[in-house]
Amino acid sequence: MRMEEHRGTELADAAGIRYLTPGNSEFMETSGRMLSVRTGGEMHSPVYVHCSFPHTNQRSFLSIRTADNKEIGMIRHLDDFPQGTASLIERQMKIRYFTPEITKVIAVSEEFGYSYWEVATTAGLCRFTVRNGSGNVKFAAENRLLITDVDGNRFVIPQVDQLSDKEYRMIEMRM
């Protein structure tokens, strides 16, 4: 074992992190198309995938949790798993982290502490409302803007610097 791996194991032990690997866990799809996992002789169903870094790296440090949010274990790297298993987990993440990309800002207006957005996205034309303030329009990375509407839906502008001047002016007061 390399020194870095040994040190990582010690840190995981100290923090109480149980890493799930292809050798100690088996992921399956339930009849209801949910995810389940067998590990340590126990079957957990359904389970949910929580990304530690959902906007920058959805392939590493994935927490697998029960419906009551109890962590079963952590997947260090999704690439360590066979493609079939990785695909099952990725499908669940796409549902949980559904975040359409905004491809064009058509209009943004403001009234009574809310902004009203009309945008074209990778999921089609959308109209949504955002409560001003409270960090509902914020940078998730240096050039990546995350927008959360009043219903908790998330939208992303992957490259703010690629917006037209007109689009940028419409959103700059909300950032």
Image (tube, helix red, strand yellow):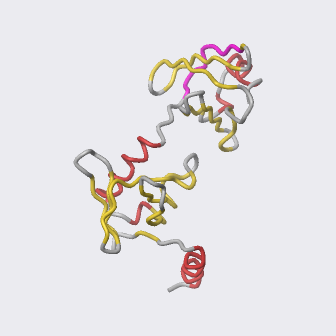
Name the side, left or right, on which 80 lies relative to 162. Answer: left
What residue is drawn where x is 60% and y is 78%?
14
Horizontally, is 69 left or right of 143 in the view? left
Q: Residue at x 72, y 19 (%)?
A: 165
Q: Is residue 109 magenta?
A: yes
Majority SS type along the magenta span: strand
Left-right relation of 10 to 50: right
Choose top left, top right, bottom left or bottom right for residue 105: top right
Q: How far from the left and from the top, in percent, is residue 164?
A: 67, 21
Q: Quadrant of the C terminus?
A: top right
Magenta range: 102-110
Residue 120 at x, y percent in the picture: 52, 20
Coordinates of residue 5 in the picture (x, y in percent): 54, 79
User: 120 or 98, which is in the foreground?
Assistant: 98
Residue at the front extreme of this rendering: 68
The extreme left residue here reads 31
Q: Is residue 2 left or right of residue 30?
A: right
Residue 98 highlighted magenta (yes or no):
no
Write down the quadrant of residue 21 in the picture: bottom left
Q: How many marks?
A: 0
Note whether 9 is above or below 70 in the view shown: below
Q: Is residue 153 above or below residue 117?
A: below
The residue shown at (25%, 51%) is 30
Toward the viewer: 138 or 4? 138
